[in-house]
Amino acid sequence: MLRLTDIVIVIKGAGEMASAIAWRLYMAHFQKILMLDTDHPMAVRRQVSFCEALHRGSQCVEGVEAMMVRSVQDIHAAWKQERIAVAADPRWLLIDQVRPQVLVDAILAKKNLGTRIRDAELVVGLGPGFTAGLDVHMVIETNRGHDLGRIITAGCAEANTGEPGAIDGYTGKRVLRAPAAGLFKTERSIGDLVTAGEIIGTVAGQTVTSRIDGVLRGLMRPDTKVTRDLKIGDVDPRGREQFCDTISEKARAIGGSVLEAILRIFNTADAGVSSPKAGQQ
């Protein structure tokens, strides 16, 4: 029997959504979590993204600690310290080395960048780009609305709408996007209050301006190389600074769905778990 706390979980991505999943699983006593990201993560909601550990060495999200790792030995050391392990591994080489029972693709690329159903006993994909039963066992719906967080065991999630979810009635206006390709320059910080028309920063000499009043809930790191139209910031019209440091309702819901997906497959029994065929409902 495999103990619940011994299940190895690998999460592709370590941004906002991936971090909410890792946080939820950690709080449910899954203690062997490894997150994989690029060499230079570009999270916007950095306060609640474990990928910041790759810049700073460690990162805390709502009381849960993660640390940067570089090797399998580092990973086990992090787990021994009851921390989430985060590695820069854009080629996913560590997956074969740690041999996870669960793999979660939380990149949110809107397409499958190489995840295979045989990568783990349970493979879960977030949002569009995956087909349950073909390249993953389960898909989690990420589109806001009635089906947010639904676990799909056959078929795909809803197509990408290209429109961010509404907060206080604001959708696209609350998102800051790069006006050009180049280095993003800013002296503002997450948590700053801003007003409509206020300059937040520049890219290649072109200004980035807030279109609404609110608080900077997310902001890309200064001096990050960005592409035109890339999301580089998020203005929350509710204006509550404490929201900058806490997981959003959408991310929390998706994290709960991944937890449910795992528990559907790995049945608890006394101190251990047994694992029937993935796809059992």
Image (tube, helix red, strand yellow):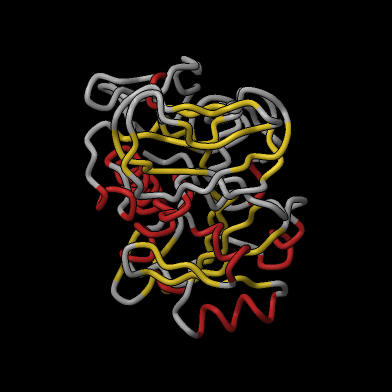
Q: Residue at image x 42%, y 27%?
A: 210
Position of the C terminus by quadrant: top left
Q: Residue at image x 71%, y 41%?
A: 225
Q: Nearer the viewer, residue 41 or 76?
A: 41
Q: Residue at image x 62%, y 23%?
A: 179
Q: Nearer the viewer, residue 101 or 149?
A: 149
* Left or right of 197 on screen, residue 135: right
Q: Residue at image x 38%, y 59%?
A: 23
Q: Nearer the viewer, residue 10 or 234?
A: 234
Q: Nearer the viewer, residue 86 or 273?
A: 86
Q: Is residue 184 visible?
A: yes
Residue 59 spot, x, y in % from top left: 48, 67
Dividing the picture into quadrants, the one containing residue 140 is top left
Dividing the picture into quadrants, the one containing residue 61 is bottom left
Position of the N terminus by quadrant: bottom left
Against 277, residue 203 (above or below) is above
* Left or right of 238 on screen, residue 64: right
Residue 226 spot, x, y in % from top left: 68, 35
Residue 112 spot, x, y in % from top left: 65, 31
